[in-house]
């Protein structure tokens, strides 16, 4: 089966955000039009981000401000999973939080007891997000708690996150790596390429993974994780001279190229890749 034939079978799309839908303050070419076309064909779209600083509602508001309609259920971040995942695995335990005040709030709302570094000896779990106040005392507290038997979680393992053209901030994975080195244990992560974020995104799409596409710019998180979840993988590669990795089913330069491909399939199929007339937009 060719990539085009496989794309024609797709009934739902999960989009990464950074580097896929937007780059810094700018939408990538064709992003809004692509989302509109997919929804117009009657298919679900979910946005799944490894963001470790905000929940989906913050990113939903950003999408809307950039001209892409989105409801709360359309956007899920790795940050959103923290409370439920820790609570489901360990119950309402004391958790040492290496992260922002928002992360403390999420854990409290999930019924866990957030503790600071001065109470680290009570912690039965350590969670790491992006932490602008990361310090040697926090590293020491987290490493000692993990070495002492506390479960070790990271929102994601991204080394960096982009904040503009050629500009990055150190990511959650950089902080988790320091704790892993000092404690001798590796964290369990919730974000891409690990399965929890894909599981939630697929539940929201409501389709089996073989008819859902993962669209993203990261081969390490979006493509590897999407392939492992059984999805069709579409790589946004703005530097097309790179060889296609084995986890990638289809490569496009930007959303505009994917839209051209989608429209071509729609033209060839008469009624379009979707079986629902374009007047029946999503609810
Ligand atoms: Mg990305």
Image: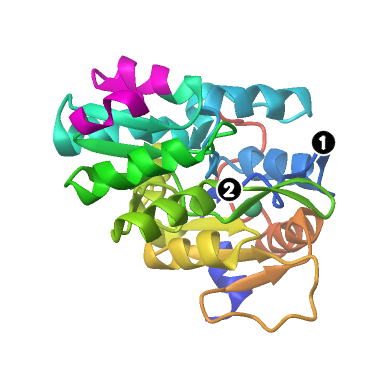
Give the overall secondary structure of the magenta segment.
helix
Query: Under tag 2, what secondary structure?
Result: loop
Asked if the beta carbon under badge 1 is closer than 8 A to the nearest atom of ligand 1, the reply is no
- Image: 170 above or below 220: above
Horizontally, is 130 left or right of 35 in the view?
A: left
Tell me the CA gap for discs 2 and 1.
19 Å
Whether residue 282 sits left or right of residue 176 in the image: it is right
Badge 2 density bin: few <14, some 14–19, many ≥20, Cα 10 Å: many
- Bounds of the magenta segment: 104-122
Rendered view: 47 above or below 270: above
- Report which quarter residue 137 is drawn in: top left
Circle 2 residue: 171
- Residue 245: image location, x then y, percent: 59, 80
Q: For numbered disc 1, what is the local secondary structure?
A: loop
Residue at point 71% right, 45% down? 21
The residue under label 1 is: 25
Seen in the picture, residue 61 relative to 261 is either above or below; the reply is above
Lower sequence index among marks 2 and 1: 1
Residue 124 visible in the shown view: yes
- Above or below: residue 107 compared with residue 28: above
| Eye-nearest disc, 2 or 1 | 2
Image side of residue 188 versus residue 30, left or right: left
Q: Residue at x 24, y 22 (%)?
A: 112
Ligand 1 within 8 Å, label 2 CB: no
* Residue 238 position in % (x across, y down): 79, 65
Locate residue 213, reporting x and y percent: 52, 57
Name the residue rendered at 35%, 24% in the picture. 116
- Along the line of sight, the residue nearer the viewer: 144 or 221: 144
- Label 1 CA crowd tier, 10 Å (few <14, some 14–19, many 20+): few
Q: Quadrant of the C terminus?
A: top right
Residue at 50%, 52% in the rendered image: 173
């Amino acid at each position: 089966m060719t990539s085009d034939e496989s794309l024609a079978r797709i009934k739902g799309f999960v989009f990464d955000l950074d580097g896929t839908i937007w780059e810094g303050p700018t939408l990538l070419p064709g992003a809004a039009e692509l989302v509109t076309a997919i929804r117009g064909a009657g298919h679900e779209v979910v946005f799944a981000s490894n963001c470790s600083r905000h929940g989906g509602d913050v990113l939903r508001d950003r999408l809307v401000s950039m001209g892409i309609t989105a409801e709360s259920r359309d956007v899920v971040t790795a940050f959103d999973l923290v409370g439920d995942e820790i609570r489901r695995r360990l119950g309402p335990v004391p958790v040492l939080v290496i992260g922002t005040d928002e992360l403390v709030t999420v854990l409290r709302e999930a019924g866990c007891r957030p503790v600071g570094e001065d109470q680290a000896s009570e912690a039965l779990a350590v969670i790491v997000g992006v932490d602008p106040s990361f310090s040697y005392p926090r590293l020491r507290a987290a490493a000692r708690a993990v070495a002492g038997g506390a479960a070790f979680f990271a929102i994601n393992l991204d080394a960096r996150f982009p904040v503009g053209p050629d500009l990055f901030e150190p990511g959650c994975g950089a902080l988790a790596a320091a704790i892993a080195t000092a404690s001798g244990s590796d964290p369990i992560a919730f974000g891409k390429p690990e399965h929890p974020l894909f599981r939630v995104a697929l539940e929201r799409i409501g389709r089996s993974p073989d008819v859902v596409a993962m669209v993203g710019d990261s081969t390490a998180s979006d493509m590897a994780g999407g392939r492992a979840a059984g999805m069709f993988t579409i790589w946004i590669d703005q530097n097309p001279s790179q060889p296609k990795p084995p986890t990638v089913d289809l490569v496009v330069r930007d959303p505009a190229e994917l839209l051209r491909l989608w429209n071509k399939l729609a033209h060839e199929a008469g009624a379009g890749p979707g079986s629902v007339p374009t007047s029946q937009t999503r609810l």
